[in-house]
Image (cartoon, rainbow, N blue to C red):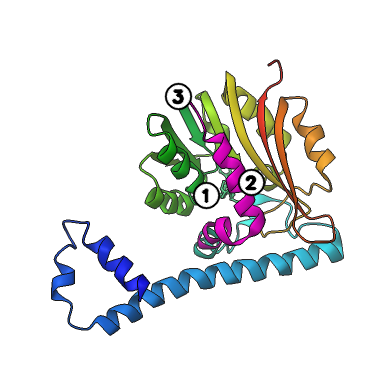
């Protein structure tokens, strides 16, 4: 069983667990435990996908997201399901996969500098960037302590629990994926990002259009609504626009942003 062998290889890499493999008596039980852990994570992705469809049906019927404040949206929130679901989605939801490939181009950087990922969520974006650009200094922030702990597992960069609006520093690159639609006043985020970006810096930016989730609050109805909000603050250098379904208004939108004057 590959999962079991992978686990043993991992254990062999730590001074605390490298002796375990030599003492294992019941390999079958070990395999069962590995499967239980994996099953729990993949079930989170399945539940997260079902929840998305349920919220999307509600959106199609009522023309609005379920919640209109962050406080209500994060009440009774299942962070484990959310973060495991989100992590799997980067490979198994075709749009998230394509957005991740779009991000890989953003990782292609000759010079060095400072990069921030906010909200860091699972941590996969920052981890990929630093893997490809080890000389860059990375930081991550999220208001959720669960996201901070989860993303720390994937990253060696410093990750801190903080509201984006409390960040005072400026960065050469910013990763800001899926935050705009989570805010009651999304335009304030664009002002903040503009303040946080060095003069010749760039932002990898992602948002959702007419695509439901428990914590989506601000409803964009089409791509132009997003562009109209971005354009007073930024030049849109490159875009990736993806339909979620073969019919309907649901879309994922990703772009690269630079300061307006450049
Ligand atoms: C959909 S996740 C996005 C995670 C990650 N960027 C990604 O694309 O996979 C939204 C995240 O925004 C975080 N968040 C919401 N409001 C925030 C704020 N004001 N400052 C920092 N993080 C915030 C939430 O805790 C959550 O982890």
Residue tagged by mark 2?
178
Q: Is mark 1 within 8 Å of ligand 1?
A: yes
Other residues around mark 3 within 10 Å, as few (<14) / some (14–19) / many (≥20): some
**The label number, if any, that marks residue 217 in the structure image:** none
Residue tagged by mark 3?
113
Asked if residue 22 shows in the view, the reply is yes
Asked if residue 161 shows in the view, the reply is no
Left or right: 184 with respect to 174?
right
Give the x, y percent position of residue 94: 65, 58
Q: Secondary structure at mark 2?
A: loop
Q: Nearer the viewer, residue 207 or 94?
A: 94
- Which residue is located at x 18 percent, y 70 percent? 21
Q: Is mark 2 within 8 Å of ligand 1?
A: yes
Q: Are marks 2 and 1 in contact (CB under 8 Å)?
A: yes
Disc 3 to disc 2, how far (Cα)? 23 Å
Q: Secondary structure at mark 1?
A: loop
Give the x, y percent position of residue 31: 32, 79
- Dot 3 or dot 1: first in sequence order is 3
């Amino acid at each position: 069983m590959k999962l079991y062998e992978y686990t043993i290889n991992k254990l062999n890499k730590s001074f605390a667990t490298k002796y375990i493999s030599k003492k294992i008596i019941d390999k079958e039980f070990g395999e069962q435990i590995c499967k239980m852990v994996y099953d729990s994570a993949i079930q989170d992705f399945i539940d997260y996908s079902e929840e998305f469809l349920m919220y999307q049906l509600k959106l199609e019927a009522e023309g609005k997201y379920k919640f209109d404040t962050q406080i209500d949206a994060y009440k009774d929130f299942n962070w484990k399901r959310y973060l495991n679901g989100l992590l799997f989605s980067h490979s198994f939801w075709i749009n998230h996969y394509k957005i991740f490939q779009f991000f890989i181009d953003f990782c292609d950087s000759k010079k060095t500098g400072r990069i921030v990922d906010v909200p860091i969520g699972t941590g996969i974006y920052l981890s990929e960037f630093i893997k490809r650009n080890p000389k860059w200094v990375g930081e991550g922030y999220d208001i959720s302590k669960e996201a901070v702990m989860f993303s720390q597992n994937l990253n060696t960069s410093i990750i801190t629990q903080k509201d984006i609006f409390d960040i005072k520093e400026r960065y050469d690159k910013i990763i800001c994926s899926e935050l705009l639609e989570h805010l009651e006043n999304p335009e304030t985020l664009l002002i903040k990002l503009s303040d946080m970006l060095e003069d010749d810096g760039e932002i990898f930016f992602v948002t959702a259009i007419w695509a439901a989730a428990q914590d989506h609050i601000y409803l964009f109805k089409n791509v132009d609504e997003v562009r109209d909000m971005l354009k007073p603050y930024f030049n849109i250098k490159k875009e990736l626009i993806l339909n979620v379904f073969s019919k309907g208004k649901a879309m994922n939108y990703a772009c690269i942003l630079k300061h307006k004057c450049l």
